[in-house]
Image (cartoon, coloured by chain):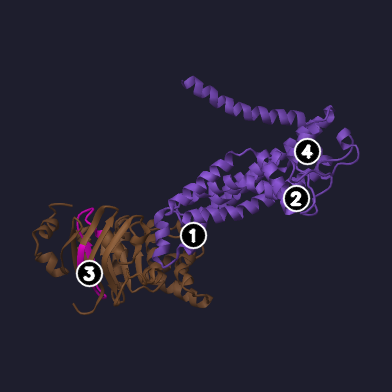
């Protein structure tokens, strides 16, 4: 693979004594959508979150191995956690807007990282809300509470909020599973547009969604990486029996 | 069994109504505008001219000051507990201390506060009363704050961390906003406990017929106004004690209503 953005090497994660991900080796290609599939409890979400050091927030978690992002292991003792989290964004399963206005939600990240100028901020908020496909719906009520938006709008707001800190990678954790089909489609359309500029890693248990979006596929089973490769290859001609069985719907 | 439950529920409501009715029946006749806008004049405690404005102003100053002071310290403790929740031994120790402090009788705070004043070279004063009341209010404040902060969903904090926020930034900008209505309620609870307490201000704030003018001078308070007037042998002065109690109840009631309204405003942004 030429120029992977993230290289995962020998990654194992355990919650207390319970292993969740075992010895994963994989490269995440730049400016493509990588989809992680696999049955529930296979370690998809853990693998995803390991790429932004969000696992640190969970008590008793142990991480071994390396996640190399732009030539640096993000688990190095000297690594700047907040910088990693800033450059690798997250779109969670259920939208959680911050308890503030629509405008403030988008401005939250940039403000943390030192952006102060009003004009600059206004332009940025508009740009990211447009990128998330929400601008036309909220431009007249930017200063009203984000909590009043519909859940589909909230998820697009969370997308805009994540884009506003200008990450290079966007992690999506079943980001459409709480949404109605139309809202889910909107998010999917955005992701397809965004992959021109961002590296996207997406966890999903909806195989049709995986087929629609994936350029690259990672198949996980019981904490182990079973197979990975370009989507066309994995979907049409999987190399492993377990991948084939999963794709044919023999287990979930 | 059900009969016992119903009887107990009626008892609870009944006691509240009985208190309100007693205070109103005994206090309303003695309540007048003059009582609310004047300080005691000569012979007030023998049933002559004057009012309890000194005690109303004193109580408001004492309870507001104490609530602000305990809010500042309470907030610091509550945020510390949130930020270092991983270090569970410290958290448990703090929680245990707060629970014990909550159970400490208010006269003990009064006595302790008095000793503290002597050490600091102060005498009974508004400042002394505020310090003693703040100590009294602190446990209830922190416990209530902690409850609401624990209710903040993990995903909300994660959303903030995922944008590159530090623990402190997340606590100050997200946690506090999400918990804001609950924090206000915590202040109300603490204020209610503070304004009604007599024993802790007895030695620390003292009593005076003058209006509060300085942090270093004694102040009057409504609970002590009730106490002193009820202790006289004159029926008309005792009636004034009930009137003072009524004023105290009305102040707490108004505070509750204002807090409710403010809470609704603050809740606009809360994520459910």
Marks 3/1: CA distance? 34 Å
Name which residue lies at 71% across and 39% down: B248
Q: Earlier in the sequence, mark 1 or mark 4?
A: 1
Q: Quadrant of residue B47?
A: top right
Q: Which mark is residue B126?
A: 2
Color used for chain B? purple
In the picture shown, does residue A195 fall above or below B224? below
Question: What element does badge 3 sit on?
Answer: strand
Which residue position holds label 3? Answer: A9
Give a yes or no on whether discs 2 and 1 share a subunit. yes
Residue for point 52% across, 75% down:
A116
Rendered shade, chain A:
brown
For marks 3 and 2, give the CA distance.
66 Å
Q: Is residue B95 visible?
A: yes
- Tell if the residue under mark 1 belongs to the same chain as the one under mark 4: yes
Residue B38 quadrant: top right
Q: Are marks 4 and 2 in contact (CB under 8 Å)?
A: no
User: In the rendering, which numbered label is found on residue A2?
Assistant: none
Residue B225: image tag: 4
Q: Is residue A15 left or right of residue B25?
A: left
Instruction: Name the residue that disc number 1 marks.
Output: B171
Seen from the viewer's position, the closer of residues B213 and A96 is B213
Q: What's drawn in magenta, residue-wise? A: A23-44
Q: Position of residue B34 (x, y in %)?
A: 84, 41
Q: Is residue A41 magenta?
A: yes
Badge 4: residue crowd in 10 Å (few <14, some 14–19, many ≥20): many
Q: Is residue B154 magenta?
A: no
Give neighbour class at mark 1: few <14, some 14-19, many 20+ (Cα, 10 Å). many
* Residue A234 at x, y percent in the picture: 13, 66
Spatial separation of the CA atoms under disc 3 and disc 4: 75 Å
Left or right? Give the position of B82 relative to B115: left
């Amino acid at each position: 693979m030429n120029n992977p953005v993230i290289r995962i090497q020998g990654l194992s994660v355990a919650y207390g004594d319970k292993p969740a991900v075992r010895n994963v080796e994989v490269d995440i290609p730049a400016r493509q959508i990588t989809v992680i599939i696999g049955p529930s409890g296979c370690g998809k979400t853990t693998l995803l979150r390991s790429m932004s050091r969000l696992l640190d927030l969970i008590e008793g978690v142990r991480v071994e191995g390396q996640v190399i992002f732009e030539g640096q292991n993000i688990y190095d003792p000297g690594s700047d956690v907040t910088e990693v989290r800033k450059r690798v964004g997250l779109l969670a399963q259920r939208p959680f807007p911050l308890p503030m206005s629509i405008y403030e939600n988008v401005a939250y990240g940039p403000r943390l990282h030192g952006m102060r100028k009003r004009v600059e901020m206004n332009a940025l908020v508009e740009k990211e809300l447009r990128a998330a496909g929400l601008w036309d719906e909220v431009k007249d009520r930017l200063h009203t509470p984000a909590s009043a938006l519909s859940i589909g709008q909230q998820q697009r707001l969370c997308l805009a909020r994540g884009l506003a800190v200008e990450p290079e990678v966007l992690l999506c954790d079943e980001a459409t599973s709480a949404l109605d089909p139309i809202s889910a489609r909107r998010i999917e359309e955005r992701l397809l547009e965004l992959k021109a500029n961002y590296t996207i890693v997406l966890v999903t248990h909806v195989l049709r969604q995986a087929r629609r979006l994936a350029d690259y596929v990672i198949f996980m089973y019981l904490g182990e990486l079973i197979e990975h490769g370009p989507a066309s290859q994995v979907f049409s001609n999987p190399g492993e029996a377990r991948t084939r069985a999963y794709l044919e719907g023999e287990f979930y | 069994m059900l009969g016992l439950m119903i009887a107990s529920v009626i008892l609870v409501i009944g006691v509240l109504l009985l208190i309100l009715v007693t205070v109103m029946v005994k206090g309303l006749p003695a309540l007048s505008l003059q009582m609310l806008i004047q300080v005691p004049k000569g012979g007030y405690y023998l049933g002559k001219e004057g009012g309890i404005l000194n005690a109303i102003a004193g109580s408001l100053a004492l309870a507001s000051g104490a609530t602000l002071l305990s809010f500042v310290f309470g907030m610091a403790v509550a945020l510390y507990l949130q930020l270092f929740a991983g270090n569970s031994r410290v958290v448990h120790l703090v929680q245990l201390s707060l629970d014990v402090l909550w159970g400490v009788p208010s006269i003990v705070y009064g006595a302790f506060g008095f000793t503290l004043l002597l050490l600091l070279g102060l005498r009974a004063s508004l400042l002394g009363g505020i310090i003693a009341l703040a100590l009294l209010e602190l446990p209830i404040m922190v416990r209530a704050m902690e409850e609401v902060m624990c209710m903040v969903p993990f995903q909300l904090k994660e959303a903030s961390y995922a944008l590159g926020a530090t623990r402190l930034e997340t606590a100050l900008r997200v946690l506090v906003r999400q918990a804001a209505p609950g924090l206000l309620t915590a202040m109300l609870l603490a204020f209610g406990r503070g304004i009604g307490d007599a024993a802790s201000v007895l030695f620390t704030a003292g009593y005076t017929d003058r209006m509060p003018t300085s942090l270093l001078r004694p102040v009057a308070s409504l609970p002590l106004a009730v106490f002193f007037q009820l202790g006289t042998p004159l029926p008309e002065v005792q009636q004034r004690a009930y009137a003072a109690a009524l004023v105290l109840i009305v102040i707490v009631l108004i505070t509750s209503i204002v807090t409710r309204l403010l809470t609704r405003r603050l809740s606009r942004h809360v994520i459910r």
